[in-house]
Image (cartoon, rainbow, N blue to C red):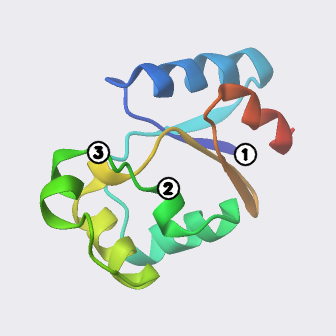
Amino acid sequence: MFKIYHNPRCKKSRAGLAYLESKVDNFEIVKYLDDTLSSDQLKSLIDKTGKKPIEIIRKQEDYFKKNMKGKELSDNELIKEMAANPKLIARPIVEMGNKAVLAEPPEEIDKLL
């Protein structure tokens, strides 16, 4: 089953959700700001994208600019920061089985179909 990690306040996330709705009938919505992911869950999800944590982090967030910018952080340190501050997680991420994509643009979801 498809799963979308979604922030309803984000235009890009809403676009990804609309695109997913146009492609598949059955999926789960995870509002990751409300139902936060553990570091282990987040690591597993990022691993499924084939990307590094730094590629999934929102560098424009104030928290990143104030606390992380310019620091050499390991992948595990980045994941811990993202788990503790879920606004740092780029969205939407769509997961299907053992694969996931950052659905930016939404057409990235096609890679999972």
The three-letter amino acid code for the residue at tag 2 is Ile
Question: How far across and down, in percent of the image, does residue 8 sit?
Answer: 37, 25
Of marks 2 and 3, which one's residue comes earlier in the chain? 3
Query: Can you tell which quarter of the image residue 94 is in?
Result: top right
Distance CA(mark 1)–CA(mark 2)? 22 Å
Distance CA(mark 1)–CA(mark 3)? 21 Å
Please tell me the numbered disc located at residue 33.
3
Question: How far across and down, in percent of the image, does residue 52 sit?
Answer: 57, 69
- Determine if residue 35 is in view: no
Distance CA(mark 2)–CA(mark 3)? 15 Å
Q: Residue at x 37, y 48 (%)?
A: 58
How many numbered tags mark residues here?
3
- Determine if residue 13 is in view: yes
Q: Residue at x 16, y 46 (%)?
A: 62
**Badge 3 element:** loop
User: Taking 100 as reference, is 46 above or below it?
Assistant: below
**Badge 2 element:** helix
Q: Nearer the viewer, mark 1 or mark 3?
A: 3
Classed neighbour count for the residue bearing mark 3: other residues with Cα under 10 Å, few (<14), some (14–19), many (≥20) = some
